[in-house]
Image (spheres, rainbow, N blue to C red):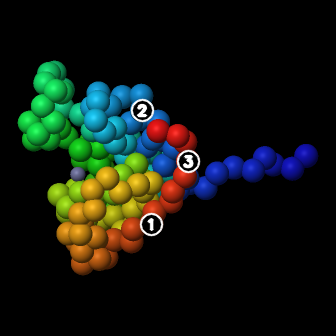
Amino acid sequence: MKARQRKSWEETALILAETIADCRSQDPYLQVGACAVLTDDSVCLGYNGPPPKVEIDWSDRERRGARIIHAEVNALRAVKPGQCKFLAVTHLPCRHCMTFIASKGIRRIVFRQIYERDTLAFELAQEFGIQLVQIPGGQPA
Ligand SMILES: [Zn+2]
C-alpha cells in the first residue's frame, strides 16, 4: 500500500494558524492566528487577544486595538532568534510585527490574506530580507 498523500508543512501551518484563531480568539471583528514552525518541526501557536486576565470592552473597535497582543507576538514569545524555519499567519503581519519577526531572524512568512494594505509592512519585509508568500484558499472563515 502506498503512503497517503499529506499536505506541505506550509499548508499545515496555515491550517493550524486558522484553527487556533477560530478556536481561541475572542475578537469579534477579526480573528488572527499564527503558527511558527521551528527547526525541529515543533510548532508554536498564537492568536490575537488581550494580556492574561484582562477584560476588554469589545464594543469600541478603536480602543481595543491598543489592548490586543497580536497573534505573531504571542506565537513567537518563547522562540529564540534562529529557531524558527518560517512563520504562517492568517493575515499579513502589520509593520510592528514585521519588525518583531525580523528580530527573531525569520526570513519567510506565509499568509492567507491581507487585512490592511500596509505598504510599510511590505517595505520592511523587503528591507529585512523577509520573503512574503501568499497562499490563498483553505478553510472557509
Ligand atoms: Zn501585528
Where residue 93 sits: x, y (%)?
29, 56
3 above or below 99? above
Amino acid tagged 1: Val
State the CA–CA distance, disc 3 to disc 2. 13 Å
Amino acid tagged 3: Gly
The 10 Å Cα crowd at callout 3, few under 14, some 14 to 19, many 20 or more, is few
Nearest the camera: 5 or 141? 141
Task: Name the residue rendered at 78%, 47% in the picture.
Answer: 4
83 above or below 28? below
Amino acid tagged 2: Asp
The 10 Å Cα crowd at callout 1, few under 14, some 14 to 19, many 20 or more, is few
- Which of the 4 image quarters holds residue 110? bottom left
Task: Name the residue rendered at 32%, 53% in the picture.
Answer: 115
* Left/right of residue 4 with respect to residue 134 in the rendered view: right
Where residue 113 sits: x, y (%)?
41, 55
Where residue 133 sits: x, y (%)?
45, 66
* Left/right of residue 79 with respect to residue 23 in the rendered view: left
* Left/right of residue 23 with respect to residue 135 in the rendered view: left
Q: Secondary structure at mark 3?
A: loop
**Numbered mark located on residue 84 in the image:** none
Q: Secondary structure at mark 1?
A: strand
Q: Earlier in the sequence, mark 1 or mark 3?
A: 1
